[in-house]
Amino acid sequence: MPEPAIPVYALVDCNNFYVSAERVFNPKLEDCPVVVLSNNDGCAVARSAEAKALGIQMGAPWFQLQPLVKQHGLIGLSSNYTLYGDMSARVMQVLRTFTPDVEVYSIDESFLRIERMRQLWPCLVVMGQAIRTQVRQWTGIPVCVGIGPTKTLAKLANHIAKKNPQFGGVFDMTTCPEGELVSLLSAIDVSETWGVGRRIAAKLDAMNIRTVENLRRASPKAIRLHFSVVLERTVAELQGISCLALEDVAPPKKQIVSSRSFGRMVMTYEELGEALSTYVLRAAEKLRVQKSVAGALQVFVMTNVFRETDPQYSNGIVIPLPNPTNDTLKLVAAALYGLKRIYKPGYAYKKCGVMLMDLSPQHQRQGSLFSQVEDVARHSDALMSVLDSINARYGRDTLTVAAAGTRNTWVARAENKTPCYTTRWSELPKAWAH
DNA sequence: TCTGGGGTCCTAGGACCC
DNA sequence: TCTGGGGTCCTAGGACCC
């Protein structure tokens, strides 16, 4: 009987991912302070090292950064999620050439199970370096690698690799002498721990737990008493006891949300309805990709909370769908019915959205006593697959629904968006020979 | 003038049942 | 005048993540 393997995890994390993805296609962005902005050119959601050095915080509103544009040549790019999604897929593809045991944790990070790789490489740091080199060479994206006996420690190892250039972008906690580890973890604020957010950090601070090392030394029982089982698990993970497994097959989503802020205030039911229908279209597309049907849908609207002197209103409503569906037309109809119930005239709306809930697998769709319903479902499936294939072939929104409107004057601002270099023939980067 | 979007999990408390 | 106990299910809200 082979011994059950003691796990070793690697966390591969792209450096300043959105900025790095933009730099692959525009070398002029190299060495400049660059931020990538959220939807509507609202806040900075990714920052180059130079931008971080200027003191720009995650989530800083773009309009407040204008002085830095003049003083330091700060560049603000509108987000290009098509590009980032495609670049992300390429990075993950490279990781899979090292091991099939890959969990894509977010658009810019993956966990790898690597204990079996020990036999193939002189040591895991060498393997980590090989990953960095290969990803850089094949995609242009710089990454750092953290290695540890649990996911939580691999995350911290990655943090150490990022913050300490002497490690060359790879840090292996499994071979680090205890003394050195203690001094490294003592220098990291407890809030850097995966699972410790603002609230918990404040509570821990009151208990004199301020560094990762402090939390690692805490008693899991005491932590369970003051917090929940989640943080108890985190402490165990810090102590090297693996509680979180690699999830290499992504479970289907339990809810799908689509919402956006508008480029300008929207007053009328008609315009809100057009925006909402557009979001339902997106959500329904995602729903069909994972082959699910929705049993309910929530609609919500809100005014601009930052304009405190404006009259404020926000509301939401859940619309049950007695026959779970992934038919865009039915979902749009339900959403508009919900909107009618909560819309109040006289307010300046800033945002609305839709959430698809009670998702279940499409093939488990409940049968009906009446065969007619089955026929209708078949027709709906056929129509939706035509819709999806036309839009996949000719671009999103080639085929849409009338309720989504055609003027769309409410769409978000995106004043500095780069081309979809990798996903549209017409926007391929051009190379000029001299 | 301008402040993002999309997820998951856990817990407490109420409704309801026997 | 006396007024149980235990279980399940559901939901809202709070915490976290990127």
Image: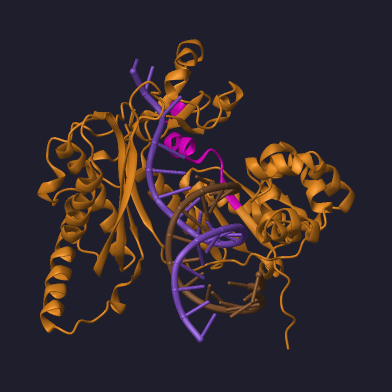
Chain colours: A orange, B purple, C brown
Relative height, residue A239 to residue C7 (above, below): above
Is residue A421 something one can see in this rendering?
no
Query: Is A372 displayed left or right of A79 in the figure?
Result: left
Which quarter of the rendered picture does the C terminus of chain A lie within? top left
Occupied quadrant, residue A357: bottom left
As drawn, is A147 to the left or to the right of A60? right
- Measured from the top left, where is residue A141 in percent x and y? 50, 43
Tell me if I can see residue A177 in this picture.
Answer: yes
Q: Where is residue A299 in the image (x, y as percent from the top left)?
A: 29, 49
Residue located at (44% from left, 30% from top): A43
Closer-to-camera residue (A401/A162)? A401
- What residue is rendered at 46% in x and 27% in y? A29
Q: In the rendered view, would you say B8 is above or below A323? A: above
Residue A419 at x, y = what percent?
30, 36
Looking at the rendering, the stretch of residues picked out in magenta corresponds to A12-29
Residue A55 in which image quadrant? top right
Q: Residue furthest top?
A: A71
Residue depicted at 50% across the width and 28% down the height: A30
Reply yes or no: does residue A247 show up in magenta. no
**Residue placed most toward the observer, A132 or A192:** A192
